[in-house]
Amino acid sequence: MSYTHKPTVIETIAEKLHLIPDLHAQGDDRGAKSATSDGTQVNCPPPDQWDNWVEYDSKSWPERKTKEYMLIPTACFNCEAGCGLLAYVDKETMTMRKLVGNPYHPASRGRNCAKGPATLNQIEDTDRVLYPMKRSGKRGGGKWDRVSWDSVLDDIAGRMRKAIQEGRNNEISYHVGRPGHEGFMEWVLRAWNVDGHNSHTNVCSSGARFGYAIWEGLDRPSPDYTNAKFMLLVSAHLESGHYFNPHAQRIVEARMKGAKLAVLDPRLSNTASMSDYWMPSFPGSEPAILLAMAKVILDEGIYNRDYLENWVNWKEYLQQDYKGTPVTFENFIEALKKEYSAYTPEYAEKESGVKAEMIVEVARKIGEAGTQFATHVWRSASSGNLGGWAVSRTLHFLNVLTGSVGTPGGTSPSAWNKFHPDVHAKPKPQTFWNTLQLPDEYPLAHFELSFLLPHFLKEGRGKLDVYFTRVFNPVWTYPDGFSWIEALEDESKIGLHAALTPTWSETAYFADYVLPMGHSAERHDLISYETHAGKWIAFRQPVLRVAHAKMGNPVDYTWQANVGEVWEEDEFWIELTWRIDPDGSLGIKQYCMSPYRPGEKITIEEYYRYIFERVPGLPEKAAKEGLTALGYMQKYGAFEVESNVYKVNERTLSEADLQGSSVKQETGLITKNGKSIGVQVKGLNCTGFPTPSRKQELYSQTMIDWKWPEYRLPTYIKSHVHQDIMNRSKGEFALVPTFRLPVLIHSRSGNAKWLAEIAHRNPVWMNASDAKSLGFEDGDLIRVNTDIGFFINRVWVTEGIRPGVVACSHHIGRWRREQDPAANRWATNRVEIKREGGGKWKMRVAESIEPYESSDPDSSRIFWSDGGVHQNITFPVHPDPISGMHCWHQKVRIEKAHEEDCYGDVFVDTERSFQIYKEWLAMTRPAPGPDGLRRPLWMGRPFRPDEKTYYISKT
Ligand code: SF4
């Protein structure tokens, strides 16, 4: 933001010769004034000039033509990081011309990855859905009619009203792919009294989350990379993963200051290639490595005694597992050493293939880094393997041993760095528990069992009357997509399916309504994520709506400023909620009232105004510039609520908190009204962690109480793709299907031409030694057999993956059928799908990607034809019996493609997939737990319902 550019000699000559625009001239000759008022060029225009910014038009070059812009901040939606974007709106055409980084965003600090600027492609996509569409003919038949928003809203609201009046609240479900909306949907769903929040988290991160939650009650890590001395990633955070742009820049910062980086990944990712230590572990063996490191730290005494002694529930461990042994710290350490004595570096090497010497060296570096040790695991190992939650649990064990929890340079719980807004009306928690989302077999599941929905419906566990999917594409993204098609096509199981989506998708093709929703720069949203040791909020705003208001032409609804009749979700939900309860008799309408105009419907501006007026420090900061809190957010798009957030567990309880509380002498636990509120540590009344002991729970009574005593301590669980069950001579491999390509967005980049141009193939990575022994050459066609079918792909022979493992990126292989609206043509193959009876499905590519004529001249310039292969649809579901996470990795058998096979072919047997679902279901140990509970009361549950619903007998 403060960078100023001094022209080089060559630039100066080129400017004088008018070969390039003169950006450095002074006074009247200052050309396009793409500079501050003192004439210096900056890498971002200063905010006081954002309403009227003038630049040369690059397309008019060499003619020196200027263009006037308004710069309006918003936030990216192309991954969860929510980086800041600054949209350039052409004042003449009132269209967005580019989106760049917003330097006032505390997490992204003006930087974006390729996906941020590509938002423009998505907005200008010539195939996008512009009007609400209603199916005609049978569901999935591909026939659509344009309808009015009024008719859509009345139809859906009427159906919902009837369901709620009849007590069928559990037949309403909202299923979200890419989330956002801090607090918004909780507000809406609770207003309806519906336990219907279903997310994608069980195919994403619930494995890792459970591993953290069982330690500290909070379910994600927030590493303070910037101040770290040593970083250990079980992920690819320099290139992909959650918050990767904000994280990557901080990892790089730390490395520039001398920090070292170790990466556990069977694949030589871009992240691993930048590391000091690449540990190409066999999938699922990571806990063995991490426990071996713990053993080294314990044996060599390089642990943090002060932290362990004060912030870990070690006394409980000794008292329970070593009855009669004096409860001393020394005895605790001896017990731990004994517990982990089998995890020698040599054993870890045998399990993982990572050299014992490297494991020891990294363990010592971790010990040296002490409290400045930052870690992260996201998806990858924790989402791939049976027992993958043990990866995050054992990784966090290293943070606990080194006392690097919540310290500068350490790793904090996510919640410390995330802001939760205060909404204007707070409906009570819902009085329903929806077992189609959290069934009793999975009492500890960290999020909804969303990927099992087709199987639950098939078993007759319930049905859905109104099913909303929002930016959600399970047919393509989830495992077992053909089972999803079978469920979605069955109107007796799903009464109405409304797909809220910015683009056509494989799932939208099986909807009753396709409702066009805005991209990131076309709607409102509030975001806050744990990107670093601070707390911030960012404001996603509809850029053209803001621009029209600035030009003196305000609109009432966002869709009026957007292209076609593209709505924003917030206004959709408010309008729908209002219509469900038109006379207020259901008690729902009251939550949609304006906090500022009694009796009137809330506007979207009022909803955010109320929140921003209550963000600590924001009104004061805004007032210094003569702005309201809302005005500040509209101007800058982001606000830092708190910086340098560390050691929140040590914050002390107030006198008011303590009034009426009592302290348990042996443990220091402070309770009030039967609930723990804190813990005494070193004589201070600390808030601690939200666990039963209020400390880090090395020893988990919860695991014992819920029938998993063998996992009461951090341990290693052998994966369902463990090398012991692989017969390499038969071509059996562990397939890693989870890795992301840095420029693609799950199933939402098919409408982004720049991104599709960069990446459009997903070959199967195979180590050169494996390829040699199987007789494969680079590019050979192979059949990859899963437990329910196969896919045909090409092999990529590389040294960048460990032997015995193959990998295939999951972003590619998008498709549409002949009857479907042409969409995402930068990335979709046209396929023929045949249903052969008995649950057998075949898919074949009929036409690969081709240039096409459209209003965008680039569509006729498409030079690639390979649209990749859809692999996820050939995977059965693998629900982990504890975390509920879908364990993505597959045991596959790879052979040469058969004569009849074609590139991109897919075959699946959904009857077999149902059997496999049953096999995994049989591994569970269902509720009830103690006191007839469905789930431990202390553990977080997404969108928590009324406490009464937790007791099976009472509901
Ligand atoms: S990391 Fe990239 S895709 Fe994700 S929010 Fe930031 S700019 Fe967008």
Image: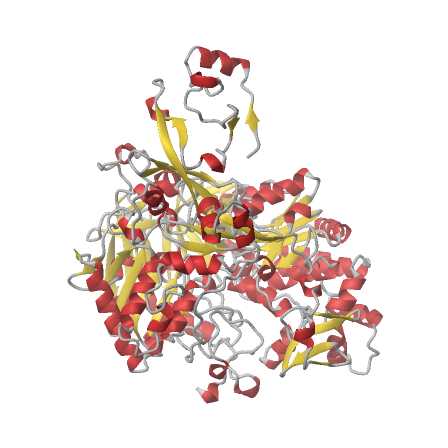
Residue 757 position (above or below residue 441): above
Question: Camera-side residue: 565 or 225?
Answer: 565
- In the rendered view, tell whether residue 832 sits above or below residue 137: above
Can you say which quadrant of the picture contains the C terminus?
Answer: bottom left
Query: Which is more toward the observer, 153 or 588?
Result: 588
Res. 34 image quadrant: top left
Residue 372 location, x and y as percent? 72, 51
Colour basis = secondary structure
Q: Is residue 590 left or right of residue 711?
A: left
Q: Would residue 264 be found to the left or right of residue 784 on screen?
A: right
Residue that protrudes farthest toward the bottom in the picture: 953
**193 up-or-down from 771: above or below:** below
Front-lying residue, 711 or 82: 82
Q: Position of residue 871 (x, y in %)?
A: 39, 54
Q: Quadrant of residue 842?
A: bottom left
At x 29%, y 81%, the residue is 165
Q: Residue placed at 44% from the left, 36% from the top?
A: 50
Report if residue 180 is visible in the image.
no
State the count of labels.
0
Q: Is residue 856 visible?
A: yes
Q: Please report the residue visible at 71 percent of the width from the left and 77 percent of the height from the top.
A: 669
Task: Please determine whether, in this image, residue 857 is positioned above or below residue 528.
Answer: above
Which residue is rendered at x = 33% and y = 51% of the image? Answer: 518
Q: Quadrant of the N terminus?
A: top right
Question: Residue 320: where, in percent of width, then height?
Answer: 73, 80
Q: Residue 813: percent from the left, percent from the top?
A: 35, 49
- Looking at the image, which is closer to me, 100 or 211? 100
